[in-house]
Image: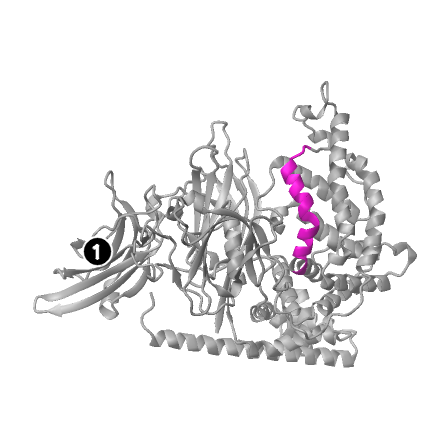
Amino acid sequence: MAKSSSLNVRVVEGRALPAKDVSGSSDPYCIVKVDDEVVARTATVWRSLSPFWGEEYTVHLPLDFHHLAFYVLDEDTVGHDDIIGKISLSREAITADPRGIDSWINLSRVDPDAEVQGEICLDVQMLEDTRGRCLRCHVLQARDLAPRDITGTSDPFARVFWGSQSLETSTIKKTRFPHWDEVLELREMPGAPAPLRVELWDWDMVGKNDFLGMVEFPPQVLQQNAPSGWFRLLPFPRAEEDSGGTLGALRLKVRLSEDRILPSGYYQPLTELLMASVLEPAEEDAASPLAVLEELTLGDCRQDLATKLVKLFLGKGLAGPFLDYLTRREVMRTTDPNTLFRSNSLASKAMEQFMKLVGMPYLHEVLKPVITRVFEEKKYMELDPCKMDLGRTRRISFKGTPSEEHVRDASLGLLTGYLGPIVDAIVGSVGRCPPAMRLAFKQLHQCVEKRFPQAEHEDVKYLAISGFLFLRFFAPAILTPKLFDLRDQHADPQTSRSLLLLAKAVQSIGNLGQQLGQGKELWMAPLHPFLLQSISRVRHFLDQLVDVDGEEEAGSPARALVAPSVIVREGYLLKRKEEPAGLATRFAFKKRYFWLSGETLSYSKSPEWQMRSSIPVSHIRAVERVDEGAFQLPHVMQVVTQAGAGAPHTTYLQCKNVNELNQWLSALRKASAPNPDKLAACHPGAFRSSRWTCCLRAERSAAGCSRTHSAVTLGDWSDPLDPDAEIQMVYRQLLLGRDQLRIKFQEDPSIDSSPEADTEKGSRAMEGACPDALAQQRAAAARLLEVLADLDRAHEEFQQREQQKVALGPLGH
């Protein structure tokens, strides 16, 4: 039975941060770490003590992760960034409430003695001879220790304590992966049994030594089952200092999702029920799994559930019927066409997630050229007189003091200069829109037209589609391009305002001009002629979009959200061969343009260059970070490949920043996830000057000294389909409504043993239903409850087997 673990993190905002700059402000950003590996970095909010980030990440994790940490820093253009404070959340704290964490948390000071990481390998034996008891501690090695020296390494040694005795290993210089292989023996002294404590320290020639971490074993563990293996290093036990809010606070939302995934066969009955819901919908289907899910799922869970359901039906080739089922239910329940799909219903969320899952390459193709122009040109644009900065726009005016009219006219020209290409790209993109999206829009168009055939509702069939495509897809991507992977960084305040104006204009076009001249934004009036002219083109575009032949093939499973040949990531990177021909490090890295698809990682000198080299994705055995000290360069990763039984080959790639590094790491790991024979360990350094820079081993073929992190990836639209994980989440959601389902369809309203309120609720649910329909609903409810009970039993059986294995195996650590 497989297990899955994912962490949903939202860094919302900060407040009352201390000023770190001479200007009396700060330029804060936040770094997110999982077990000391940086997984995300927010944008820098310039000149603010109460920054708003609003950035959200989904991190797929290994099951043995221990803690999550948030570091807030002040960015400086000269020198090192200043550390403001940190928040550390243990796994236990995150899982204490099933709903996760959603609160303000005070920042704490960063204590160097608490910043420990890594593991130590020990083999402990308790021996007895004529002189009494002896403890033999074999200190073999350590890995991934914290860098304490300016070179990015440490000079570690181990100190072993047992009772009043202590011994030390030798010091190994300039490494975070020391190999000691030393045996230390300590004699038992009179008195009570003592614990064994092993401390690691970084030796310093000047000043005091730096603490690297410790492990401790109580006497009962030493006597019952002496420790042997790898152990995680811990800080000295001490209460975490609460700064009392003097360092400010962060508002965080954190939720951990962990589950056991059963073999596929166990989910087949539930999958068949879900498929039957959309392929053979009953007239009264209140007891179908989808109807139950729609009724019970609220809030943040609804978006997660919508994503899982869309992926599940995509994998079965039934995304079209699924969306048609949900939208028909909502359309038939809607009496006022002006409120159609305006709420965050399951149908709305499912369509929104569907567009993101299958339409991201299309979105990039349509919007990326103009978004790139806006970021690069950094033009000042403003139509709202209340927000105009005439002093800042002095350069816009050719002579004299700029007036509001001058600024407005210049801004209008710039806005239409960007909007024109955006509208042209959208209306000219019919042939590039994914067929699955066009078929979904066609079904929606037909359903709405049938429900509201009156002449006064002529626009409703257009608004139903444009409400999704323009208001929930194009406009949000223009407003926050980083969240749609159109940019690596958030926009600065000026560019952000320009994007807001463009997004408002695209929203007005998507609304077909129904709200032009209304509301508080009358200052948008200068744009109205352009918007009205564009609306007629958009109507024609929507007519063409739904003019598509063919039906989605039911039962043809999709193995991935995108075809293997589709590019999921591209951009410039610096590439270094494993064996540079005598070049200095800075010259060994060459700038190349890379493309990643599900099949190959290819590169050339430029995007236009015809000759490309490529690395088959099927040959990738590991994708890992490289220590900064290996080349004295930041943001370097390595791609380890091996063709068949051949020798492994390593390619080093340098990214521009930590976010780009994380995105490439995640994309490469997900693309190579199905590969067999993945490496369990590798070298985070490089083989230079006849030795590895990480562990100092002289053999090039030496086994890797650090664990690989192939399970750590960022969730995004290119995630591969995992039907078993998706149906498991659906099962968990159905469990929440099981009792309500029993009350509504199975309990006899005439029986007084049930609670009176529930009985009345059941009676009202049945009232007015015809006997045949009622019998069908009760049969459907009984079948669903039976399937859920079977899955319950399967989970209990697998859990009991795991507990038996743990009980029979060695003591865990």
- Image spot of residue 480 (x, y percent): 64, 46
Residue nearer the viewer, 414 or 220? 414
Q: Which residue is the extreme one toward the left?
A: 130
At 71% from the left edge and 39% from the top edge, which residue is drawn? 501
Magenta stretch: dominant secondary structure: helix
**Stretch of the chain drawn in magenta:** 358-380
Instruction: Name the image quarter holding residue 773.
Output: bottom right
Indicate left or right for 113 with 410 as reference: left
Which structural element holds mark 1? strand
- Image spot of residue 244 (x, y percent): 43, 40
- Image spot of residue 154 (x, y percent): 30, 47
Instruction: Name the image quarter holding residue 738.
Output: bottom right
At 25% from the left edge and 45% from the top edge, which residue is drawn? 203
Q: Amino acid at mark 1?
A: Val
Q: Which residue is mark 1?
A: 160
Tally the marks: 1
Q: Is residue 371 magenta?
A: yes
Q: Answer yes or no: is residue 157 visible.
A: yes
Q: Answer yes or no: is residue 100 visible.
A: no
- Image spot of residue 316 (x, y percent): 65, 72
739 lies above or below 154 = below
Q: For the C terminus, give its image quadrant.
A: bottom left
Indicate left or right for 12 with 71 as reference: right
Label 1 environment density (alpha carbons within 10 Å; few <14, some 14–19, many ≥20): many
392 lies above or below 726 = above
At 29% from the left edge and 61% from the top edge, which residue is drawn? 121
Q: Is residue 678 magenta?
A: no
Q: Which residue is the extreme one toward the top?
A: 400
Residue nearer the viewer, 295 or 526? 526
Residue nearer the viewer, 150 or 2? 150
